[in-house]
Image: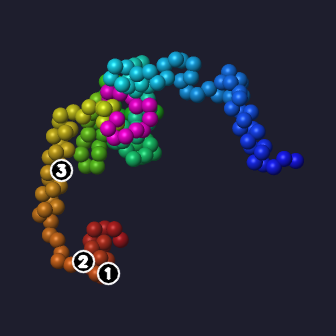
């Protein structure tokens, strides 16, 4: 009987010698099409260019960093907080470049147009290129930010940190207890 380490190495060696045409081995995504790695003049891969392609809305919202997880994106879509072209949709709705998206980000309405379909969740700089926010949405966010800055500046601040009893009273007033 051989030891498990040698058996594992032999299996790995045997699998690496199989070609992609072998029925026991799956080909890599995009293999055999001849377009993997090619890009258009703007530097976007075929999956990002989005010509004739579609992507689920929950995956797109997660990939362009509008939500921290795909589950949160799916919950928002199924809860009616996300609309595509003015209509309420389900998480499996296919999104295409040119679609208009409206969603609630916190307390602010966010409107944008889909430009690209990203192949994966990448850095924020790449994600920002996948949509164009409307001018009204940018203005709403700026006004909301200014109101929040004023609210923070005008709210009273205590001289010292609250003690145990004062913290309990604050939690009770804020409805967290």
**Span highlighted in magenta in the image:** 114-126
The residue wearing badge 1 is 164
Q: Find residue 145 and name its label.
A: 3
The mark that comes first in sequence, 1 or 3, is: 3
Secondary structure of the magenta portion, mostly?
Answer: loop
Residue 136 position, x and y percent, is: 17, 36
Badge 2 local density, few (<14 within 10 Å), some, or many (20+)? few
Side of 78 relative to 140 (left or right):
right
Q: Is residue 161 above or below residue 147?
A: below
The residues tagged by marks 1 and 3 sit, at their Cα atoms, a distance apart of: 32 Å
Between circles 1 and 2, the one closer to the viewer is 2
Query: Residue placed farthest to the right in the image?
Result: 1
Q: Is residue 108 visible?
A: yes
Badge 1 local density, few (<14 within 10 Å), some, or many (20+)? few
The residues tagged by marks 1 and 2 sit, at their Cα atoms, a distance apart of: 10 Å
In front here: 77 or 146?
A: 146
Residue 26 position, x and y percent, is: 64, 28
Side of 123 relative to 36 (left or right):
left
In front here: 34 or 23?
A: 34
Residue 98 position, x and y percent, is: 31, 24
């Amino acid at each position: 009987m051989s030891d498990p380490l040698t058996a594992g190495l032999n299996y790995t060696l045997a699998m690496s010698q199989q070609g992609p045409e072998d029925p026991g081995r799956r080909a890599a995504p995009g293999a055999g099409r001849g377009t993997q790695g090619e890009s258009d003049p703007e530097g976007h891969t075929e999956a990002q260019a989005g010509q004739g392609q579609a992507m689920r809305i929950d995956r797109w919202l997660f990939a362009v960093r509008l939500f921290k997880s795909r589950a949160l994106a799916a919950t928002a879509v199924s809860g009616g907080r996300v609309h595509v072209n003015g209509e309420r949709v389900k998480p499996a709705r296919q999104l295409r470049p040119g679609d208009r998206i409206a969603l609630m980000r916190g307390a602010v309405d966010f409107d944008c147009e889909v430009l690209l379909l990203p192949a994966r969740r990448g850095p924020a700089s790449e994600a920002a290129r996948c949509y164009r926010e409307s001018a009204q949405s940018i203005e709403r966010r700026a006004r909301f930010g200014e109101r929040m800055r004023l609210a923070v500046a005008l709210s009273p601040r205590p001289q010292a940190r609250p003690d145990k009893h004062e913290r309990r009273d604050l939690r009770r007033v804020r409805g967290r207890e």
